[in-house]
Image: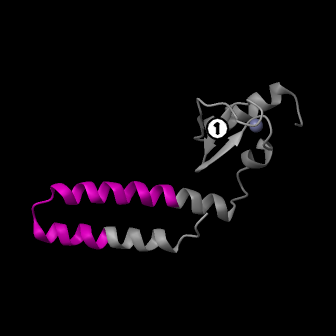
C-alpha cells in the first residue's frame, strides 16, 4: 500500500537474497507476488516488507514457525531412518531422538 511497485520489487529481491522463496501462487487478496520467509508467507503488495527486511527484529511467532518447520523435517528424516535401520542400538537412539522432537513439537504453541 505504501511505496511504489519499484520499491516493493526491491524489497522482494532483498528478501530473496536473505533466503526467502518466491511462491508460484499469487496473493488471494490482491493478486500480489507472495514470498515465503522464515516459515511465513508475505504478500509483496499488501504486507509491510520493510519491517521484515530490517532483520534485527525477531518475532516470537517467526521463531516458532521456523522451529516447527525444522523439527517436522528432522522428525520425518528420523522416522525414515528408523524404518531402514537394522542395528537395535541405533534404533534406540533414533527412537529417543524422535521422541524428543515430538515432545518439543507438542510444546510449541498451536496456531
Ligand atoms: Zn496481497
Callout 1 secondary element: strand
Residue 61, how many percent across, how many down?
65, 62
Span shown in magenta: 68-97
Residue 90 highlighted magenta (yes or no): yes
> In the image, residue 70 lies at what x, y percent?
46, 56
Q: Is residue 60 left or right of residue 54?
A: left
Q: Position of residue 74 (x, y in %)?
A: 37, 57
Res 93 → quadrant = bottom left
- Please state if 3 lies on the left or on the right of 27 as rendered: right
Q: Quadrant of the N terminus?
A: top right
When asked about the image quadrant of residue 99, the answer is bottom left
| Quarter of the image where ligand 1 sits | top right
Horizontal and vertical percent position of residue 34:
67, 35
Q: Label 1, on which residue?
A: 35
The response on whether ligand 1 sits within 8 Å of label 1 is: no
Label 1 packing within 10 angstroms: few (<14), some (14-19), many (20+): many
Residue projecting furthest to the front: 28
Q: Which residue does the image show at 76% across and 37% down from the upper left?
A: 29
- On screen, 44 above or below 73? above
* Nearer-the-camera pick, 50 or 31: 31
Residue at horizontal 73 percent and vertical 48 percent from the top: 52
Please report the residue visible at 59 percent of the width from the left and 70 percent of the height from the top.
109
Q: Is residue 15 above or below residue 83?
A: above
Q: Choose top left, top right, bottom left or bottom right for residue 23.
A: top right
- Taking the image as shown, residue 13 lies to the left or right of residue 65, namely right
Was residue 6 drawn as part of the magenta stretch in this picture?
no
Amino acid at each position: 500500500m505504501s511505496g511504489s511497485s519499484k520499491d516493493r520489487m526491491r524489497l522482494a529481491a532483498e528478501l530473496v537474497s536473505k533466503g526467502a522463496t518466491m511462491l508460484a501462487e499469487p496473493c488471494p487478496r490482491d493478486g500480489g507476488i507472495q514470498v515465503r520467509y522464515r516459515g511465513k508467507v508475505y504478500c509483496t503488495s499488501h504486507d509491510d516488507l520493510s519491517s521484515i527486511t530490517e532483520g534485527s527484529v525477531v518475532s516470537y511467532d517467526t521463531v516458532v514457525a521456523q522451529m516447527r518447520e525444522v523439527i517436522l523435517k528432522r522428525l520425518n528424516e528420523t522416522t525414515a531412518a528408523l524404518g531402514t535401520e537394522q542395528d537395535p542400538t541405533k534404533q534406540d537412539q533414533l527412537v529417543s531422538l524422535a521422541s524428543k522432537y515430538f515432545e518439543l513439537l507438542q510444546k510449541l504453541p498451536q496456531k
